[in-house]
Amino acid sequence: MTEIGKKTWAIPGSNIPLEHTGEEPEFTSHDSLWVLNATDDDADVQMTLYYADREPVGPYHIEVGARRVRQVRFNDLIDPEAIPLETDYAAVVEANTPVVVQLTSLDTRRAEQTHSRSLGFPGE
Amino acid sequence: MTEIGKKTWAIPGSNIPLEHTGEEPEFTSHDSLWVLNATDDDADVQMTLYYADREPVGPYHIEVGARRVRQVRFNDLIDPEAIPLETDYAAVVEANTPVVVQLTSLDTRRAEQTHSRSLGFPGE
Amino acid sequence: MTEIGKKTWAIPGSNIPLEHTGEEPEFTSHDSLWVLNATDDDADVQMTLYYADREPVGPYHIEVGARRVRQVRFNDLIDPEAIPLETDYAAVVEANTPVVVQLTSLDTRRAEQTHSRSLGFPGE
Amino acid sequence: MTEIGKKTWAIPGSNIPLEHTGEEPEFTSHDSLWVLNATDDDADVQMTLYYADREPVGPYHIEVGARRVRQVRFNDLIDPEAIPLETDYAAVVEANTPVVVQLTSLDTRRAEQTHSRSLGFPGE
C-alpha cells in the first residue's frame, strides 16, 4: 500500500447557503469534507472549525478506516455543535495518519446548480 | 524536454451522478482523470480505487505515451471492474515516470451543467 | 493550536464581471479573498494588486484576528483605491504570521450562477 | 517587491468546446492561461502544448512585463499554430523568472455557463 498524504490540512473558508432548490438531500446546498486514508491504519481525524467573530469550535471526531474514503457533509455535523448556515467558516483537520483532504460545495439556491472543488492546504 | 511531475498522486474523493440531461456522450455526467506525461519515456500508470465501505479495487492499467496527455473517463473503466455510479470513491495513481494528474467532473443532472476541476495531490 | 500556513501567497489572476442577475448583495458578481489565521497571533495582512498594463496598487491592509477566518470581497476594497470591474487583476498577499489563502468567484451574469474556488499559491 | 513563483508549470489537461451560447467574445467557450509576474524583471514565457496522439507543438512565446499579470486565451493562439477545438490538450509553461500560473475555463454550450479554475502544478 502507498502511504500518501499529510497529517494536517486547512480549508481556508466557505459559507453554506440556507436556501436550495430541488429534491433533498441530493440537491440540498451543502459543503462536504472528503478524507482519503490510503494507509493500513485506521485514521482518527479531529476537525476544528474557525469563524469570523468567535472562538474556534471543536474538536469534531471523524473516523476513517484503513484504505477507505469518507465524505462528511458539514451540514450534518452536530457534535460538539451544528454548523450555522449562511456563516463564514474555515476548518483545520488533524489526523494520526497521513490523509488527503478536499472540500466540495454544491449551491442550488437558483433553479440550477453550481459545484466547486478544491484540495485542502497541506501542513508540514 | 522538461520533466515535470511526480510518480504518486491522490484524488481524495468524488461521486459520479447516475442521471444526466443532454446528448450522450458529450453531456453524460462523468468524472475524468487527466494524466500528462511530459517525459521522453512511455508511462505505465496504475490506479487503485478506494471506497467508503469495502476494500480498494485495482490496479487499473493506463498507458500514456511519451510526450502525451490522456483523458480517461472513470465511467468507461471496466477492468478489473466498472466503477459504481452514485458511490463515493477516491483514487491513488502511481506511475513509473513523473506525470501530472488532474480530476475534472461534469454534472448535468439538471437542465444546465456544472464543471469542477482540481489538481491531484502529489506524493513525495 | 496548530500553526498552519505560509506568510506569502499569490492569486494569479481574475476578472470581476460588471453585470449580475438576482438580488444584491447576495448575487452580485464578485470575487472574495479568504484568509484563515489559525495562529494565536493577530495577523496584519498586506495585499498588493497587479494589473495587465499599469503598476501595482497597494498595500491594502486587512486585519485577521487570532483564530479567525475573514472573507474580503474585492468589490468592497476602497483604500488605496477601488478595484476596477471587468479588468484583469492578480494579487500577492503577505502576512506577519502564517495564514492560508483562497480565492472564490461568483459570476451571475446569466440567469443562473457559477462558482469557482482555488487555493492561492504559497510562497516559501 | 516580493518574488513569488516558479519557473516551470504544468496544466495537465483541458478541452475547449466548439459551441457556445451568448455574445462573443465575452461568452465564447474558452480556456485562459493566467501568468502573474510579480518580479522586477520582464518574463519571457515559453509554452509547449501536448496532445493525445501527436507530438508536442511549440514553443508559444508570451511576454509578461515586470510587475504585470497577463491573461492569454488559448483560443487566440496562432503561432506556431492555432489550438484545435474539441481536442484534449495539456501545457507546460517555462519562464526565465519566477511566475505563478493558473488555468480558467468557461463553457457556455448550454444556455447558462460554468466556470472552473485551477492553479497549475509547479515544478521544482
Image (cartoon, coloured by chain):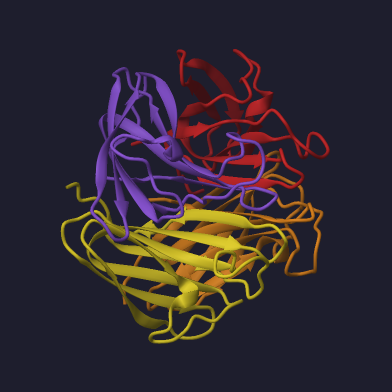
Chain colours: A yellow, B purple, C orange, D red
Q: Is residue B33 visible?
A: yes
Question: Viewed as shown, does residue B110 lie left or right of A104?
Answer: right
Q: For this view, does B61 lie left or right of residue B25?
A: left
In the figure, residue B102 lies in which quadrant? top left
What residue is rendered at 45% in x and 40% in y? Answer: B75
Could you tell me which residue is drawn at 50 percent across and 75 percent down?
Answer: A75
Q: Is residue C14 visible?
A: no
- Using the image, determine if residue B120 lies above or below residue D12: below
Q: Position of residue D80 (x, y in %)?
A: 59, 12
The quarter in which the C terminus of chain D is drawn is: top left
Is A82 displayed left or right of D28 in the figure? left
Taking the spot 35% from the left edge, 30% from the top edge, the residue there is B4
How many numbered marks, from 0 up? 0
In front here: A84 or A22?
Answer: A22
Indicate left or right for B78 with D94 as reference: left
Horizontal and vertical percent position of residue B51: 32, 55
Of the pair C53 and A104, the residue shown nearer to us? A104
Q: Where is residue A105 shown, x and y percent of the image?
A: 54, 61
Tell me: residue B17, above or below residue C79.
Answer: above
Q: Nearer the viewer, residue C34 or D26?
A: D26
Residue in front for this viewpoint, D8 or D23: D23
Q: Residue A96's x, y, as percent? A: 21, 67
